[in-house]
Amino acid sequence: MADIVIVNPRFGTSFWGMEHCMRMLGKKANLPVACLPLLAALVPPGHNVTIIDENVEDLDFDRLARANMVCVTGMSVQGGRVLEILTELKARGVFTVIGGPMATVEPEAVEHLADVVFVGEADVTWPQFIKEWEVGRHARRYEQLEKTDMATLPRPRLDLLKSSRYMFGSMQISRGCPFTCEFCDIIVTFGRKPRLKSREQVLAELDSYYREGIDIVFVVDDNLIGNKKAIKPLLRDIAKWQEEHAYALTLFTEASLDLAEDDELMQLMGQAGFQSVFIGIESPDEASLKETKKYQNVRERAGTIVERVQRIQENGLDVWCGMIVGFDNDKPQAFDVLPGFLSRARIANALIGLLHAIPTTPLYDRLKAEGRLNTGEGNDTYGTNVIPLGMSPAMLRDGLIGVTEQCYSTDAYFQRLDALFIEGKFKFAVHQLPYWRTHRIAWAKRCAANYIKFAVLTRRLSRQVADRELAKRYLTQLRGAFAKRPLEPQLLFTYAIKTAMHHHYATITQELSASRGGTIPESVRSFSRRSATARGSASTKAA
């Protein structure tokens, strides 16, 4: 029996990671990388498997040195820590394996430090390698040529995660996206034909989360609705499971903006227990969207982007979004329109980042051919490897700082949040279902739990925020929300979470403001690089 350890290196602080509010939420990290429990499940029987996520526990290199094999996964944004870990393990003579998004798009950066490198999906090659390693006949590099048949995947080993240390669980239903956005590596890694798990697999995984006591799950699919025809029956199955378990799981996911064009799909998502959806809007400028081939966001017959966002909100789904600045079409004026756009769309949680060219993407290839990739010192200074056309790198950096300060000022953030949750009288679809009218006891328990969580988080925000003026503002907002929506504890608890998230955003904004005229901080550079990769790379099934 071999001792196999799977390691996920720590992430740097980023807009996406919520690090500055985790303590208030009583957690170590927002969610586990989805590939960790799947990789453990793919290990053939007869071996001892341990998962170590550095985001929720410290690495013990003496422990790793005793293992027969240490497997490291990581995104490019974890690259510095990936290299540090591999270097230390190599010095100790540990047999190491590397895979995941970074190894897939930058294999040359890691292959000299690891004994074995995996490129792309590894659902077939990973167990194949272990069997070959057992008899001393393994290869140096593995690249799975065929896309994984999702119906063949085992149930992830959630029992090996320290689930109580995460805010959310992470689950994958499908891989792939039908669209061709120039900056995105999803179609390169996962292809344009969405592949889905079977009904039996999905329900079995829901059972696993239920048994582990996880009540909020992020479905990490890059585009859950990439195959609308196939996802609809699955959503009906999930809705039935939720009814049988008193809607024990709160779900949120990522989807394309064309969700707004399918009323049935929005209704099914609400019935299945989805409360929020992250949408890659990227830009309110149609010329920039067309430039990057984001055609699904440019559909005149479907209405404006704001109208489509509001349609999704009217169906009881809270919209988060990703915005990117630095497209070739963008001029300095692009920063002026973003705050107003987000205000009209009533999107509180908007992750704003710089365009970044990821290796293997069409954008990277085009800019390389044009001589517009900056991989030197300016990359660190300005936060992107893209040399912009419509402005200087310094103007792009300063524009990002300015628009972030505007969008995440306390007044602007809570104006957007209140416009939807308070003045807009937003209601989550799942909380309006007829189911609750015939399950009063379950509804009462749910309400009581959310009142308690709202009260606890309100108390923590009032006591743990060091800036006392900001803490007072948070308390004012929370009291106001309670006064106006007192009978909706589910919405109140979500409002409290979003208030805590503002503290995270405000802290990063302060760091960004302090960098004006200098080097963009890593927290913002991390998001710029993750804006196109995190939507899928967190679920890349490479070792």
Image (tube, grey):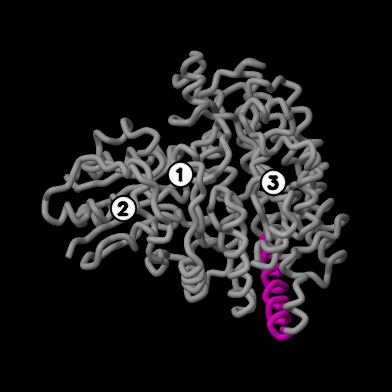
Earlier in the chain: of badge 2 and badge 3, it is 2
Residue underneath mark 1: 190
In what element is the residue under mark 2? loop
Q: CA distance from mark 1 to mark 2?
A: 14 Å
Earlier in the chain: of badge 1 and badge 2, it is 2
Q: Amino acid at mark 1?
A: Phe
For this rendering, which residue is in front, 219 or 386?
Answer: 219
Q: CA distance from mark 2 to mark 3?
A: 33 Å
Q: CB atoms at circles 2 and 3 under 8 Å apart?
A: no
Q: Is residue 420 part of the magenta span, yes or no?
A: no
Q: Position of residue 511 (x, y in %)?
A: 61, 36
Main SS category, magenta section:
helix
The disc placed on residue 82 is none
Where is the N terminus found, in terms of image quarters? bottom left
Which portion, as a residue range, is magenta? 439-462
Q: Amino acid at mark 3?
A: Asp
Label 1 neighbourhood size at 10 Å, few (<14), some (14-19), many (20+)? many
Residue extending farthest front: 229
Label 3 neighbourhood size at 10 Å, few (<14), some (14-19), many (20+)? some
In what element is the residue under mark 3? helix
